[in-house]
Structure formats: structure tokens, C-alpha cells
Image (spheres, rainbow, N blue to C red):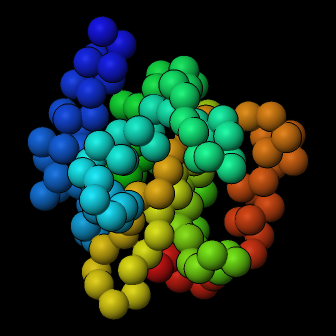
Amino acid sequence: MRTKSLRGIFDRDISDDSENFKFKSKQITPTPADGIIKLDTLFRHLTTVIVDKKTRKREYDVHRSQRLHWVKYHIKELKKDDVLIYSIKEPDGFRTYIYDVTEKYVIVLEPLRNKNEYYLLSAYYVRGKDAKRNKFVKKYKRKLDNIL
């Protein structure tokens, strides 16, 4: 029942309107994964969390799932106050972040250089040591001059 309800939100906001799922007029596509339906993979990333790094096992995450409807709201930049939007160079490549400072919620995008699009890597409620250290505010201090 829970999965069906969450899938309804996901389909309404992302799957069913994928042509208009854009950030700063760039198309957003699910993270690529060989042999797996991409939207199913994205749905799992937005509603589960890795519990075993070695096996990459994921389990339901109430904090991500409760905020699933926030993804589109932040991607469309409907919230104007206390949101940091920036790109930085990370060890794994460039990342663009949408960080809601008040709600401690982050969306992580990977800008694609050769295309006018992004991969949506993740979106989650920031808690624990990352929240205590203000991880995303600190990253903001290293931001590039332009949003990629």
C-alpha cells in the first residue's frame, strides 16, 4: 500500500510529466543503470537509502518518502527563500545542488557536459552528522561561478 501511494506521487510529478521535468530549462533524466528500467531505479533512490555499502542493499526510508513530493517543488524553483543553488567540482565529477536550508533538504544533480540535461542522482532529508556539520552550506562556499 505504501509503495503504491508513493508511486502515485512519483508518477504524477516525474514519470507522467517527464517532458516537463526540467531544471533551468535543462531536461532531467534518471541515473543510467544497465539492464534496469531507469524510472524504477530513480523511484528506489528517492524512497530508499543504502543500508549496506558493500552489497548496495537499500531499504525503505521514511524521511525520503515523506518528502517525495518536494522534488518537483524544488526542481521548479517554486521556493524562493533560503534555497542555495550551486555547482561544484567533486571527486566524482561536477554536481549541481539545490539545498533548502530551512528544511534541510537536498537534491543532487549531475550536469552533463555534452548534452543540455542533468541526471537526477538523489534527493533526501539531511540529518545526522551531515546536518550538524552544515555539509551543504560548506560546499556552497566552494561553488563555481556558474550553475552548470
Please, is residue 138 above or below residue 7 in the view?
below
**Where is residue 89, by image quadrant?**
bottom right
Nearer to the camera, 85 or 109: 109
The quarter of the rendered structure image containing the N terminus is top left
Disc tally is 0
Q: Nearer the viewer, residue 41 or 82?
A: 41
In the picture, measured across the screen, residue 27 lies left or right of residue 18, that is right
Q: Which residue occupies 50% across, 45% down?
A: 123
Question: Which residue is rendered at x = 27% and y = 27% of the image?
Answer: 7
Task: Name the side, left or right, on which 51 lies relative to 129.
Answer: left
Q: Nearer the viewer, residue 40 or 106?
A: 40
Residue 7 left/right relative to 96: left
| Residue at (70% x, 78% y) in the render | 91
Q: Picture quarter containing residue 26? A: bottom left
Q: From this viewpoint, is residue 7 visible?
A: yes
Residue 102 seen in the figure: no
Name above or below for residue 93 compared with residue 33: below
The percent position of residue 141, horizontal first and vertical second, equals 77, 70
Of all residues shown, which one is farthest toward the bottom?
114
Q: Is residue 45 above or below residue 84?
A: above
Q: Position of residue 65 (x, y in %)?
A: 46, 26
Give how far across and how far down residue 88 sits, in percent. Answer: 63, 76
